[in-house]
Amino acid sequence: MRKLPNQKGMEFKLVVAVRKDIKISPGKMAAQVAHAAVSCAMKARGSKKELYSDWMREGQRKVVLKVEDLAELEQIERFAAAAGLITDKITDAGLTEVPPGTITCLGIGPAKEADIDRITGHLKLA
C-alpha cells in the first residue's frame, strides 16, 4: 500500500459535469449527480481497484462542474475516454421533469486530480 498525501494535498477526485441548458430542480440535479458518482465509483471498484481504494481512503472527493450543453458534455466525455479515464453519462428515465432519454450529466473518475484537470480544468463550479 502506498502512502497518500495529507488532506491539504489530496491526490484523487471524481468530477461530475452537469448541463446548464436543461431546466431541472436542484433536487433532481442532485439525484442525477449522485447517479453519476455512484456509477463511476462502482466501475472503478471493478476495473481499477487500487485507484478506487486510494480515492476511498482519501475521503472520496467529488466536484460538480457545469458545461454549457450536450455537445460540450459529449466532447468532454470523448477527451476523458481517450485519456483512459472512467466515464459514465447519465440518461434520465423521464418520469418527472425531463423527457425520457435526456442526458443530464457526466461522471469522470475517480482518478488522479491532475489527470482529470487536463480535461475539466477550464470548467466552472456548478
Image: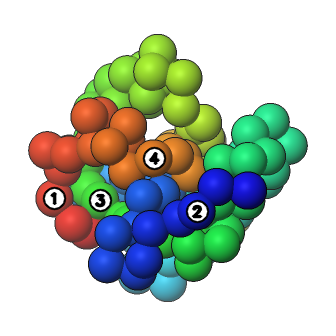
Report, in whole angstroms, how far the alpha carbon at label 2 lies from the one at label 4.
Answer: 14 Å
Amino acid marked by disc 1: Lys
- Colour mode of the rendering: rainbow
Amino acid marked by disc 2: Lys
Q: State the mark number for residue 124.
A: 1
First in sequence: mark 3 vs mark 2: 2
First in sequence: mark 2 vs mark 1: 2
| Secondary structure category for the residue under label 3 | strand
First in sequence: mark 1 vs mark 3: 3
| Residue 52 seen anywhere in this rendered image of the structure | no
Image coordinates for residue 111, horizontal then vertical, percent: 52, 46
Read off the residue under disc 3.
65
Height in image: 58 above or below 42?
below
Image coordinates for residue 48, horizontal then vertical, percent: 74, 39
Would you call the spot at circle 1 few (<14 residues within 10 Å), some (14-19), or many (20 or more)? Answer: few
Report, in whole angstroms, how far the alpha carbon at label 4 lies from the one at label 3.
Answer: 17 Å
Q: Quadrant of residue 36?
A: bottom right
Quadrant placement of the C terminus = bottom left
Q: Residue at x 26, y 34 (%)?
A: 118
Read off the residue under disc 4.
112
- Left or right for 12, reference 50: left
